[in-house]
Image: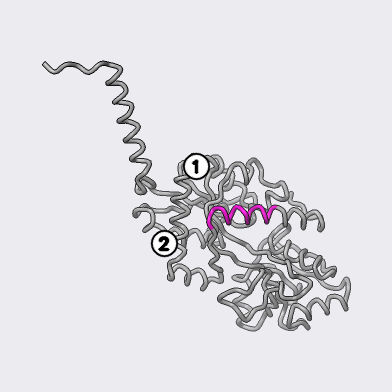
Amino acid sequence: MTPRMPRPRRAFLAFALAAALAASAHAQPGAYPSRPITIVVPFQAGGGADTVARLLATHIAGQFNGQSVIVDNRAGASGNIGANYVARAAADGYTLLLTNSTITINAALNFTQGYDVRKDLRPIAQLVSSPVAVGVNSSYPARTVAELVSHLRANPGKANYSSCGNGSPQHFAGEAFNQGAKVDMVHVPYNGCAPAVSDALGNQVPILFSTIPNMAPHAKTGKLRMLGVASAKRLSFMPDVPAIAETPEFKDLDISVWFGLFAPAATPADVRGRIEQAVMATLKDPKLRQDFQSRYYEVDALGADGMARQVDKDLSMYGQLARRANIKLE
């Protein structure tokens, strides 16, 4: 008869076996994901964030053991409904947020409605950006940023500019332009980018700040003239359009609409690292890069640390601009 192992010894071995199995499962890169992943987009279908999310979802499945990636649109309250939903979601890596820099504007202006972008969410990766551009109706007497500044200074109090809405990145770019050039254009906010572009085409408000995807098709037809992009450097796919920062008054102007991925704050570091790795590998795909650039998005991938620095930079920049221009969200 085989002697029975003492109970304390059996308990210790059972515990050691369980710990070893758990460690083994934890170490296996294939352990996550084991089921579909949901990317929440806090805006309506068809917009920029939705487009970016769906392109990413289509290409990243190969990095996730073939698991499907689902895009879930939860629009409302300037992106806050979807962001708050993800901030409160299970922190297991299966519910992620893909949003744009509206999230840092909301935070800088105390308009987050129930979540803290630093405490409740963790940056995973920045994917692409679309710098804000300044453009004019083709009949407007300015062909460069410097000429626009000269014309505004020669005609004080006579110019308006449009944006996609109060507190939008386009609004902030316009106010940064005002402050940099020391001019006094009056802001005309629209309910969305499309009507602002439409009125620029109709010459009702001939100066506009908008994103490249909204403006570039009309610049190609000659109906609008794109004077410069509000980024630190020219775009790789549009090198003939200067950066506004090339004009001395705006050497520090850099306002882009970036798109990035967040996870609930308590998501384990190894899971966040796995997602970051998958995103960064996916963004190297030449086909995906071409898909983004054909839609006027610059692929400027940043990992979690780089994106966290971008969030901090935005919070500081938008907060300062809002105070100087008295920009508020309600």
Percent position of residue 107, x then y: 68, 49
Q: Is residue 110 left or right of residue 216?
A: right
Give the quarter of the image for residue 7: top left
- Report the magenta residues as a range: 303-315
Rate crowding at label 1 as few (under 14), some (14 to 19) or many (20 or more) other CA atoms within 10 Å.
Answer: some
Q: Is residue 16 left or right of residue 166?
A: left
Q: Identify residue for label 2.
A: 59
Q: Nearer the viewer, residue 181 or 161?
A: 181
Q: Amino acid at mark 2?
A: His
Residue 314: within the magenta?
Answer: yes
In this figure, what is the number of numbered marks? Answer: 2
Instruction: Decide which of tag 2 and tag 1 comes sooner along the chain.
Output: 2
Q: Give the vertical position of 252 relative to 75 (above or below).
A: below
Q: Identify residue for label 1.
A: 267
Image depth: mark 2 or mark 1 in front? 1
Percent position of residue 213, x then y: 59, 70
Give the quarter of the image for residue 252: bottom right
Look at the numbered disc 1 and give the secondary structure of its residue: loop
Magenta stretch: dominant secondary structure: helix
